[in-house]
Image (cartoon, helix red, strand yellow):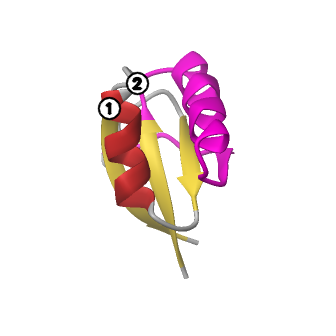
Amino acid sequence: MDKPLILVESITYAIKGRDILNRNGFRATIQKIIKNKELKGCGYAIYVKERADEAADFLNKSGIKVVSRTDWGH
């Protein structure tokens, strides 16, 4: 099953983004990811089980730069 992840530039943005999403009706957690050439960012992502695309848009509008959105298989 794939996990919808929102990749951000730093652990600071991951924490801020998670908090913003949780205050605004999303259920978000921080996920440590293994960095590789395919996944850009700091090595941390925001996991939002539902409405991940909407959450990524919300973060961008809130000033949290989203590096990319991916569905990470595990």
Place residue 32 in its image quadrant.
top right
Identity, as a three-letter code, of the amino acid under mark 2:
Ile
Task: Write the residue at 52% across / 22% down.
Answer: 13
Quadrant of the drawing holding the C terminus:
bottom right
Vertical arrangement, residue 46 with respect to residue 2, above or below: above
Mark 1 crowd level (few <14, some 14–19, many ≥20, 10 Å Cα): few
Circles 1 and 2: CB distance less than 8 Å? yes
What segment is highlighted magenta in the picture? 8-37
Q: Is residue 54 visible?
A: yes
Q: Nearer the viewer, residue 40 or 50?
A: 50
Crowding at dot 2, Cα within 10 Å, few <14 / some 14-19 / many 20+, comes out as: some
Give the SS element for disc 1.
Answer: helix
* Residue 72 place in picture, x, y as percent: 47, 64
Name which quarter of the figure residue 34 lies in.
top right
Badge 1 amino acid:
Asn
Q: Which residue is mark 2?
A: 64
Q: Which residue is mark 1?
A: 60
Q: Residue 48's spot in the image, x, y percent? A: 56, 57
